[in-house]
Image: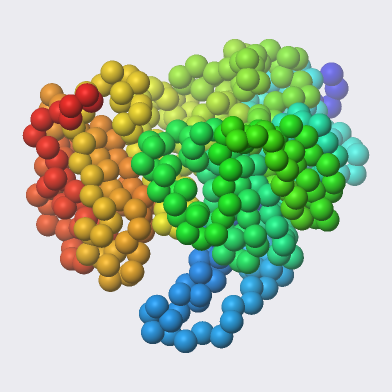
Amino acid sequence: MTNVERYDILVLGSGEAGKYLAWTFARAGLRVAQVERGLIGGSCPNIACLPSKNVIHSAKVAALFRRGPEFGIQCDPIRPDMRRVRARKREMVEGLVAMHLERYQASKAELILGKGRFVAPKTLEVRLADDRARTLTGNRVVIDVGTRAAIPELPGLTASRPLTHIEALELDRLPEHLLIVGGGYIGLEFAQAMRRLGSRVTLLEQGTQLAGREDADVAQGVLQLFADEGIDVLLDAHISMVDGRSGESVRAQIRTPSGNQSVVATDLFIAAGREPNTRDIGLDLAGVQLDDRGYVRVNERLETTAPDVWAVGDCAGSPQFTHVGFDDFRIVRDNWNGGDRSTRDRLVPYCVFIDPELARVGLNESQARSAGIPYRISKIPMTAVLRARTLSETRGFLKALIAVDDDRILGFTAFGVEAGELVAVVQTAMLTGAPYTLLRDAILTHPTIAEGLTVLFQQAPQEAQAGA
């Protein structure tokens, strides 16, 4: 193999973990190359986390305008402008990409835009935009190629050219009737946002509840929220076939417990899970094995089956959150520097950015019962949190699971205003192993949402719940 360019570190993909590894070790003086096929900085700043929250906030503003009279503010009729919504999102993305480019320049990591494919162990062929090719090899190689939206194999679905989150974030028009398939966090967030911007929305979920991994009271709370906002939800609904064209008219044939029916909409949005971008990149030639779901097989130190090759982020089967990708970076960084970190026992929080937010860390009741872990439960409605009353945002509840044999917090769920911020407070206590009484007895600022934690933990029972 001739004209091979040699690097200390070679990174395929520029997701959260990969880009921080590139910047960090390039700043330390190593020769680093990062190969990216198009999304500088990965999915999060371009087509996923941050752009979606940008559009969701536009929808939140529209919802607040409609509630104006409730707060003593008279507003004219609301007329969302999807072109301006998109423009605001694009302006943010452009700024984020510029920030990333500055970091590459400052760190001296070489960013190579092109399609990378392994042609030998620790060796990539990169096809550039002008069709030239470069061959790169690294002493250490990191795979950070992420995931993409999964499109189920259903008759007529691919031909209907459905939207995924990528195309939905680029809409410059308001769908008259948006049919969303999938009641996970992507489907939930987009359903509410598009409804608030003015679309009629129908959401199909093949499970028996929304937010399938959450407790029944959470799922019911979200279902009621959607009903109150005029979102039609069909549960235990299975699409058998699709015909038509998304963006014009599309019909989905659906099986439900009450019988077969069809839904006709102008636009179809698929939010039915993710699949790894591990196909056709030569991983077999690199000696990198995949698991039975197509994710890169790694150990708890994120090492692959090939020597001196690591995989990080979504493609390694890590929980699919940017904050987990950042922790993957810290694990590899510290181990390369002589440390001993792993993915064992990570306490991973998450937040669904519906309004009000849904956030959780640790166990919920379903998981505790499934694992046979006894618990005490404390739960209060958001009406008990005085700050929520001042905001007129009293929907939802706070719930905590507490160990029976000591006062450790096993898990915390917040469905309410600012839940994403509140969960970090409880997570911090859990990380230190502090008893729930620490938060119960803390002096927290009045009136804040966090103050609700003192109310929540005051309600903690002294003994395990019957049947827990």
Q: Quadrant of the N terminus?
A: top right
On screen, 44 above or below 337?
Answer: below
On screen, 84 above or below 169?
Answer: below
397 relative position to 174: left or right = left
Q: Quadrant of residue 72?
A: bottom left
Residue found at x 43% / y 85%: 73
Nearest the viewer among 175 and 347 is: 175
Q: Quadrant of the C terminus?
A: top left
Relative image position of residue 436 (x, y in whole percent): 16, 40
Count of numbered labels shown in the rendering = 0
Residue found at x 25% / y 60%: 383
226 relative position to 6: left or right = left
Nearest the viewer among 412 and 224 is: 224
Residue 144 in sight in this render? no
Residue found at x 78% / y 24%: 280
Residue found at x 51% / y 66%: 60
94 relative position to 231: left or right = right
Relative image position of residue 31 (x, y in whole percent): 63, 35
